[in-house]
Image: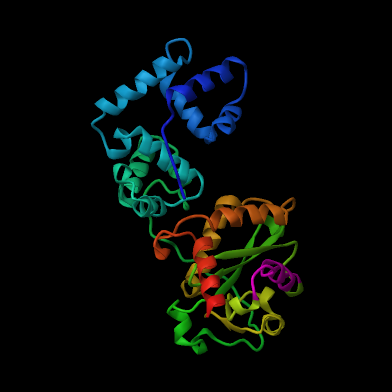
Amino acid sequence: MMSYRHIDLDERYVIHKNITSGKSLRASAELLGRSPSSISRELKRNCGEYWYRPKEADDKSKVRRKKSKQRKLDKSEDLRDFVLEKLEDGFSPDSIAGRIRLEGWKTMSISHESIYTWLYKEARNGGKYHEYLLGQRKKRQNRLKTNKNRLKIPNRTSIDKRPAEIGGREIFGHWEGDTVAGTAASGYLATVVERKTRFLASGFMKDKRAETCNRALSEAFAYIPDSSIKSITFDNGLEFYYHENLKELFECDTFFADPYSPWQRGSNENANRILRRFFPKKMSFCNLTQEDVDKAVHKINSIPRKSLGYYTPYEAFLNEQNVALQT
């Protein structure tokens, strides 16, 4: 469950004590359980003529909340700080707005559209908050399609032959798979997403050989019961050449999307885009470890989703597993 409270006078005295002692913003953030960016914004907004004074900062904060007549995010310092912190944690505007409704925080209610509008307005005025968005765009933009040359996979079963019930996302245990590449072939991530719960699992690969990919997927699925793996729908990359080995290992069906049709694996494509927040396209994977990947995956699985009623993929996945055990 998410929680938030604005910085109070006691915390401001702690911040003052730390900065006068020469401690870093991060030290104050860790001590107060805040993000470093929240402490930084507090100092920028509330520093006096010569230095940061807790009582003066508290008075300034109260005056702003009373007098502001701008947009909702401009008007409410508490709501703005909350939204910025969650954006920094990887939440989308829709996830933030939906989770607030789920928690029943009427005093902090806001629509995802209002968040986007505010972010784009700030971008036009030179602000940088839009960089928290998945696409880091300064304004709305149509999603571009990219085409890739694909080699044919032997003994592949086309998505056209996949049962319609899988496409409906009503049955738990059906996955989508693909890979994410580091710059200059410095490494790869094998990614799989459960279609119903959007739960992500990922394994690090030093190269893109089919044997390496199978090993990475086996490790990614290590803590997931085979009963929760009923099918996997792959992209047409050569790394899935030995898909039949996975089919035998997990006792599941394997299917392949049509070439140049990423929307047929929409859950996986979206998860990969979110992963790029942690591992950008220009990033080298040479020093990347499985621990780094696991940390990113944990954060992604902890982000509420509109498609899940604003529950997280982790919550939805555990619930489906519990239901499976009870039946």
For the point 43% across and 22% down, the residue is: 9
Residue 22 is situated, as x and y percent measured from the top left of the image, at 62, 17
Q: Main secondary structure of the magenta part?
A: helix
Asked whether, in this view, residue 178 is left or right of residue 101, the answer is right
For the point 48% across and 52% down, the residue is: 134
Where residue 170 sits, quadrant-wise, is bottom left
Where residue 214 sits, quadrant-wise, is bottom right
For the point 31% across and 47% down, the residue is: 110
Residue 147 is situated, as x and y percent measured from the top left of the image, at 52, 69
> In this picture, is 133 found above or below 67?
below
Q: Residue furthest top?
A: 50
Residue 281 visible within the image: no
Residue 2 is situated, as x and y percent measured from the top left of the image, at 46, 47
From the viewer's side, name the closer residue of 317 and 181: 317
Range of the magenta residues?
212-225
On whether residue 213 falls in the magenta region, the answer is yes
